[in-house]
Amino acid sequence: MKEILENLYRQKTLTTDEAKNVIVDIALGKYNHAQIASFLTAYIMRHITLRELRGFRQGLLSLCHKIDLSAFNPMDVCGTGGDGKNTFNISTLTSFVIAGAGIPVAKHGNYGVSSVSGSSNVMEQLGIRFQRDEASIKAQLKETNICFLHAPLFHPAMRHVAPVRKELGIKTFFNMLGPLVNPCQPRVQMVGVFSLELARMYQYLFQEEDVRYAVVHALDGFDEITLTAGCKLISNDGEQMISAHHFGFPAIVEKDLHGGDTITEAAEIFMTILEGKGSPTQNHVVLANATVAIQTYYPSYSLQESLEKARDSLLGGKAGKTFTNLKEMQ
């Protein structure tokens, strides 16, 4: 690790194989917390390269507990986090909305590191028990159209990194990796990222694979479609700028997206929205994200068709019922 750190401090970069190997060595416990913290800090101080991101991803996937859900062709909707905005759990709500609209979902999630409440915090607070057993997860998908893949169960090798990330309390390159290392490797993904540079890297990685994808980044820094400003959307079909008016909604302000100051508050906000009782601005944000997710899965659907399916799921009670069904299977 000493040689690696010295090279990084001199602004040298790693090859794909070097990046893969160092992540594997970290995961196998070959380095102490101080060394891991120094390694993470080096990437806080400078940008990650595409080949480094590719190598880190390959390393994590080589060690994870993979699960085969290909028979369901599920979609994942996942954000990198790390935008420092403390919004309510938009991507998790979107996942239940599109599941209620008929799209199978394998939601990859984790505890919050740089935010009050990540998707796993909210699910746990609301009584969802995390599963790793493949038969149980397949049963959830079959019966409810959604399953939740709690990252630490599938990436146990990251136990050496988790306490360091928690102590640092800020985004690291592991935020960048979260949506890329879903253990079922879904063939359809909608990903929110915290920077336009990272959106480009995701685009390059997805273009190397046979996947349907949508990568979104709001130009005011959010890793979601937030309707607070213009949003860059990069997909198989090209690139475009979208905004609230794209969906026929009024623009909103950042305070409307507040996710609560505690996990309990975050869970209460989550359920209020999921039960169709959210404010118009909260509903509009979830519907906008769900609309893009539905169009990603079904590219032949028009914007209006996708929006109507999302609205029927959220406001018609299907999304809430999907959550109730999943919870009843615990």
Image (cartoon, helix red, strand yellow):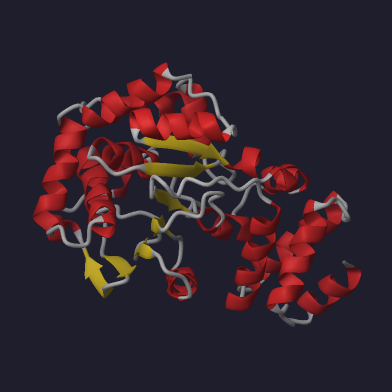
State whether residue 89 appears in this view: yes
Which residue is more in the foreground, 194 or 311? Answer: 311
Which residue shows up at 15% across the image and 29% down it? 316
| Rendered location of residue 48, percent (x, y) | 62, 72
Say above or below: 85 vs 14.
above
Quadrant of the image for the N terminus? Answer: bottom right
| Rendered location of residue 326, percent (x, y) | 39, 25
Which residue is more in the foreground, 174 or 282? Answer: 174
Say above or below: 188 vs 120.
below
| Residue farthest to the front, as pictured | 71
**Occupied quadrant, residue 282:** top left
59 to the left or right of 112: right
| Residue farthest to the top, as pictured | 328
**Occupied quadrant, residue 2:** bottom right
Which residue shows up at 64% across the image and 38% down it? 153
| Rendered location of residue 317, percent (x, y) | 20, 26
Which residue is more in the foreground, 279 or 60? Answer: 60
| Rendered location of residue 179, percent (x, y) | 50, 55
* Number of numbered tags placed on the structure image: 0
Which residue shows up at 21% across the image and 34% down it? 314
187 to the left or right of 242: right
State whether residue 262 appears in this view: no
Which residue shows up at 53% across the image and 51% down it? 182
Which residue is more in the foreground, 286 or 82? Answer: 286
